[in-house]
Amino acid sequence: MRDVESGQFAAPRAFDVLSRYRTEQLSLNTSDRPRIQLPEAPFVRAFLQKYPEAKSEPVALNSFAPPLARQFAQRQLELIQSGQDTAAAFAQAEKDFAARIQALRSRYLASATGSTNPLELLRQAEQEALDAGLEALAETQRR
């Protein structure tokens, strides 16, 4: 548009329309973007505050399963909606997820002390699951 106004180029036929309606200036720094607040967000923050090692938990990007913190918060939200208060729902959700939280803590402590590589722990867990599956398959074939 500036090139046409400078006189270096011939004005197109629709120039008068283009000059009447200028385009808006685009700004990528808009501060009025809508923020989405999920109902379980405060519960996720409370869980991560109590169990900060959950922040370092690996998340599979090609999986539909949410991370442990979000699953915990959704369970706590279900308990609150069923009539329990927040503290009791948190305690009940801790009982429900006790095994997974303990496994998370043990992986975190093992990686923090440097005794075992976390990838090695995951490989061992996968190998155990694979061995259990193969044993179950062999058992079904024996019958």
Image (cartoon, helix red, strand yellow):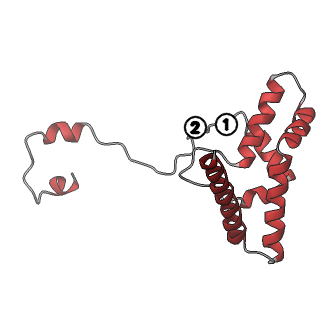
Of 101 and 142, nearer the camera is 142
Say which of 108 and 40 sits in front: 108
Residue 24, image x, y percentages:
36, 42
Q: What secondary structure is marked by label 2? A: loop
Q: Quadrant of the C terminus?
A: top right
For residue 32, what is the image quadrant? Answer: top right
Residue nearest the observer in this picture, 53 or 140: 140
- Residue carrying label 2: 34
Q: Which mark is residue 37?
A: 1
Against 138, residue 127 (above or below) is below
Hey, which quadrant is residue 44 in on the image? top right
**Do the CB atoms of the residues marked 2 and 1 lie less than 8 Å apart?**
no
Q: Residue at x 92, y 35 (%)?
A: 87
Q: Please give the name of the residue rendered at 85% of the width and 38% of the height, measured from the top-left corner.
A: 93
- Name the residue: 61% across, 50% down: 137
Q: Is residue 14 left or right of residue 111?
A: left
**Residue 120 placed where, x, y %?**
69, 71
Give me the disc on residue 77: none
Crowd rating for badge 2 (residues with CA inside 10 Å; few <14, some 14–19, many 20+): few
> Is residue 134 toward the left or the right of residue 72 in the image?
left
Mark yes or no: residue 52 visible: no
Dot 1 falls on a residue whose secondary structure is loop
Q: Can you see residue 48?
A: yes
Amino acid, disc 1: Gln
Considering only vertical position in the picture, is 17 above or below 112?
A: above
> Horizontal and vertical percent for residue 136?
66, 50
